Image (cartoon, helix red, strand yellow):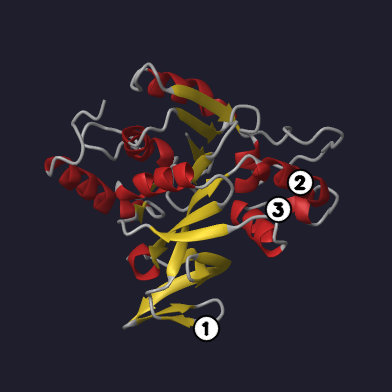
Amino acid sequence: MTLLLMAAGSGSRYGKLKQFDDLGPEGEFLMEFAIYDAIQNNFEQIVVITKKENVSFLEEHLRQRLPDHIKLDVLAQEISDLPKGVDYKGDRKKPWGTAHAVWTARNVVNGPFVVLNADDYYGQSVYKKAADFIKSNNEAYALLGYTLKNTLSEHGSVSRGVCKVDGDNLVSVNERLKLVQHGNKIVDEDTGLEFTGEEQASMNFWVCRPSIFDKIESELKIFLQDEDKIATSELYLPFMIQEMLQANEVEVKCIPSGGEWFGVTYASDKEKAVANLKEKTEEGLYKTPLW
């Protein structure tokens, strides 16, 4: 099984590259806890998608720490990495989005894989749930969801994909751009929509199959023909999966993670993240140092 971490963001709201901030008790990156938890659940390949200038540093950093039997691939998400026959002559600096980040791994991933953000903490139990799903299901995709009220930030609004489910089947994920807590309800200040907080939210923890690569490639070709989109727009992984779902090309399960999530969207989130990781280490959930 493969764990794919997306670590190519620029950290504009955080103020620096949060993927490489020393949040653990011994200076560990947040992604190292995800990698550790995945390895404990028999994941054997780690793929990290990052910026070209960070590849060598991150590959050396992780190779020195990971067990020898773990396959490690650190890949650069590059603007020039496009489908055969497609060319782009513009001067865009911003990456093509999370779907393109996943597509970057098409030549090194050969089986089911888990995708997640390198700058989020997803809890330990979710990796077992993902591994169990992969072992018991040969075709379906899955979203490991989190209770919406537990995914907010005390320091500003957040964007979340709010899930609509039917039993254990994912029906849709609707992106809400400015979610904030108002009393006992959650309001999307962008649309005025209200939520109870008990809804499942997507925190970008997906179980995918290699079929996603063909879908992303075909959508990239269409995307790159639109002059308006290629200026500033991005291709997002959840949109790709939702399109496949609505076209009945895949079945997607929504599995409540039952775990704790926290992230570092804002610089002020760091103190809480550091305290959380320190507490979990002191409780014996993690070794220190981690490796």
Type of amino acid under label 2: Leu
- Residue 105, given in percent of the width and then of the height, sits at 61, 33
Question: Between disc 3 and disc 1, whose residue precedes?
Answer: 1
Measured along the vertical axis of the image, is residue 79 above or below residue 61?
A: below
Q: Residue at x 39, y 22 (%)?
A: 61
Front-lying residue, 182 or 252: 252
Q: Residue at x 57, y 51 (%)?
A: 140
User: Alpha-carbon distance for marks 2 and 1?
Assistant: 32 Å
Number of residues whose C-alpha sits closer than 10 Å to that of mark 3, classed few (under 14), some (14–19) or many (20 or more): few
User: Which quadrant is the C terminus positioned in?
Assistant: top left
Type of amino acid under label 3: Thr
Measured along the vertical axis of the image, is residue 123 above or below residue 285?
A: below
Q: Residue at x 49, y 56 (%)?
A: 143
- Residue 66, given in percent of the width and then of the height, sits at 35, 22
- Residue 89, given in percent of the width and then of the height, sits at 83, 37
Measured along the vertical axis of the image, is residue 151 above or below residue 135?
A: below
Measured along the vertical axis of the image, is residue 88 above or below residue 193?
A: above
Question: Between disc 3 and disc 2, whose residue precedes?
Answer: 2
Judge from the rendering whether residue 244 lies leftward or rightward of residue 280; answer left or right.
Answer: right
Q: Give the residue number, with chain letter if any, for mark 2.
A: 220
- Residue 239, given in percent of the width and then of the height, sits at 64, 58
- Frontmost of labels 3 and 1 is 1
The secondary structure type at the circle numbered 3 is: helix
The secondary structure type at the circle numbered 1 is: loop
User: Alpha-carbon distance for marks 3 and 1?
Assistant: 26 Å
Q: Give the residue number, with chain letter if any, for mark 1.
A: 192
